[in-house]
Image: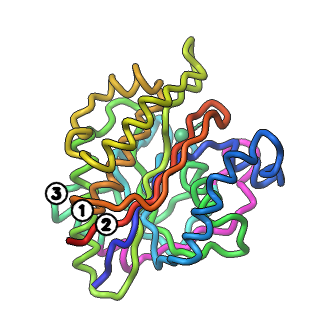
Amino acid sequence: MAKIVAGIATSHVPAVGHAVDSGKTQDAYWKPMFDGYEFSKQWAKDNPADVAIIVYNDHASYFGMEIMPTFAIGIADSYAICDEGYGPRPVPVVEGAPELATHLAASLITDDFDMTVLNVLEVDHGLTVPMSLMYGTPDKWPTKVIPLPVNVVMNPQPSGERCLALGKAIRRAVEQFDGDLKVEVWGTGGMSHQIQGARAGLINLPWDIQFMDDLINQPEVLQYKPHLEYMIEAGSEGVELIMWLIMRGALGDKVNEVYRFNHVPASNTSVGHLILTPKED
Ligand code: DHB
Ligand code: FE
């Protein structure tokens, strides 16, 4: 049986990718933030997973106004890196996990989650920056990946309730897979940030910390938080945080907090990061 062994949450600020790619992680501006991921890089080495289901959003890099799936899942063998305007990031190709992904797609759709199935996908900073933060700069990524893009950039966006429920369905689906795999679920994006308009630069650290506490202890309450509250309290891009609910739903009722980190700011964003494991009781 495949098993969900951990959940990772992290912001995915694109400038972090640039700092990694241009060797600036030890510069005065960036060092305190990257230092906060040193524990996580070691933890990832000590607790290797076979597959990471990475819940992220495409920033109109591969999808666009023409087509924007609400929930999608990649079932391909591999995923190329998207050119977001400055050429693709110089990171390894992302290797897929087509057998588990195909099982997940079938299981989720049978479970009434009408996923868009992607045989081709190029991944943007939403997926590659979290990988750089957790794994550094290897020649080959240590984990196979199932990308799970969620629309958080165009109205209408899925509800928090639906996201938490999708996470629970992912858990059921993984546990039904006949294969001895260690699976992680990652929720990326957030925390508070607004990158455009009159309130550009908005950060609300107390709200972010409360969100983390609630995500750990009472995600069922968090699922009813309206999108408008994310926008008012956490800025227009803060709504990326609904993707963390998918990760949390996949971990079961109770979790252990293995690691927590906050840093303000990185670019325009309040950086938040969690490593959680399911609490077996
Ligand atoms: C920033 C953060 C994001 O999550 C993003 O997708 C784009 C920009 C930023 O802080 O600059
Ligand atoms: Fe983003």
Residue 142 in the image: above or below residue 22: below
Residue displayed at 75% across by 60% down: 90
Q: Are marks 2 and 1 in contact (CB under 8 Å)?
A: yes
**Outermost residue, left side:** 111
First to last magenta residue range: 82-103
Instruction: Provide the residue designation for mark 2.
Output: 278
Q: Is residue 63 above or below residue 44?
A: above
The answer to whether the residue bearing label 3 lies less than 8 angstroms from the nearest atom of ligand 2 is no
Q: Amino acid at mark 1?
A: Gly
Helix, strand or loop at disc 2? strand
Compare residues 277 and 111 and report the one nearer the observer: 277
Tag shown at residue 252:
1
Residue 98 colored magenta?
A: yes
Residue 159 can be seen in this image = yes
Q: Amino acid at mark 3?
A: Asp
In this rendered view, identify the residue nearer to me: 163 or 104: 163
N-term-proximal mark, 1 vs 3: 3
Give the structural element (helix, strand or loop) at label 1.
loop
Q: Is residue 17 above or below residue 193?
A: below
Which sits earlier in the primary sequence, circle 3 or circle 2?
A: 3
- Residue 109, how many percent across, how many down? 22, 62
